[in-house]
Each structure stands twice: as structure tokens, then as C-alpha cells.
Image (cartoon, rainbow, N blue to C red):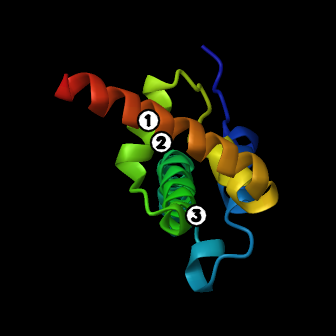
Amino acid sequence: MPRVKTGPYTRKRRKKWLKMAKGYWGAKHRLYKTARLAVMKALQSAYRERKRKKRVQRGLWIIRVNAALKAHELSYSKFIHGLKLAEVQLNRKVLSEMAIIAPDSFNDIVTAAKKALEIESASEKA
């Protein structure tokens, strides 16, 4: 059985990890073992933060809509409930953009939500 030498493949594999660690500080971009661990941790963090970014962005949209509703003396939860009653199907991102860019259209939506809430409260009293 002939002897197999794996030097080139090992070097290629190690260079791959060191290339991904380019720009890291200290031994993390020089030493193979440290670089591999640092890159693996960085990849895990990047994956986790890609998921987290979506949650943070949705929270920002909600904060913006809530701030725009303060002028209308309406809470965010009542507004969303009113939208569901009025059968307006706009997501938080669109509502947030409308509150910033097109306040007149946003006011129309708020009015529709308020009317739906008034109709509901009148039907509950009867």
C-alpha cells in the first residue's frame, strides 16, 4: 500500500480558516487553532444577529407608530385592534413608513380605526 501524504490538503484547509480570520487582532489572525475558534464564534454570532435584527427592526416600527399615534390620543394596541376591526391589512413596516413619509394617509387610516372602535363599543353597549 503506497504512503499518502496530506500536506497540501492540510495547508489548504488551514489557509482557508486563516483567510476568514483576516483582520482579526493579535493571534486570532496568525495562529490556526485560535483563528479557527474565533471564526467559528464569529459565524455563530453573525447567524444569531441576522435573526435578532428582524426582531429589533419590528420593535422600531412599533415605536414609530406609537409615537405617531400620540398626536391622535390613541394607544398602539387600540389602534391595531381598530385596524383589525376595520379590516385594514397593513403591516407594521408600512404603517411606520406612512407615519413618517405620508402623514395625511396615516391620518386617514387612524380615522378608519377610530370609527371601527366606536362601532364596536356602540354594539357592546346595546
Q: Residue at x 29, y 29 (%)?
A: 122
Query: Which residue lies most toward the front here?
Result: 126
What element does badge 3 sit on?
A: helix
Image check: 7 left or right of 79? Answer: right
Q: Amino acid at mark 3?
A: Ala
Query: Which residue lies most toward the right here?
Result: 101
Q: Amino acid at mark 1?
A: Gly
- In the rendered structure, which disc, 2 or 1, sits on the residue that comes first in sequence? 1
Quickly name the residue at label 3: 68
Q: 87 or 90: nearer the eye?
A: 87
Q: 8 or 1: nearer the eye?
A: 8
Quickly name the residue at label 1: 82
Q: For residue 97, which numbered disc appears in the image?
A: none
- For the residues labelled 3 and 2, the Cα–Cα distance comes to 15 Å
- 3 vs 20: above or below: above
Give the quarter of the figure containing the C terminus.
Answer: top left
- 49 vs 1: above or below: below
Q: Residue at x 72, y 52 (%)?
A: 97
The image quadrant of residue 71 is bottom right
The image quadrant of residue 3 is top right
Q: Residue at x 44, y 45 (%)?
A: 79
Foreground mark, 2 or 1?
Answer: 2
Q: Position of residue 13 (x, y in %)?
A: 67, 45
Q: Disc 1, disc 3: CB below 8 Å? A: no
What element does badge 2 sit on?
A: helix
- In the rendered structure, which disc, 1 or 3, sits on the residue that comes first in sequence? 3
Quickly name the residue at label 2: 114
Q: Amino acid at mark 2?
A: Lys
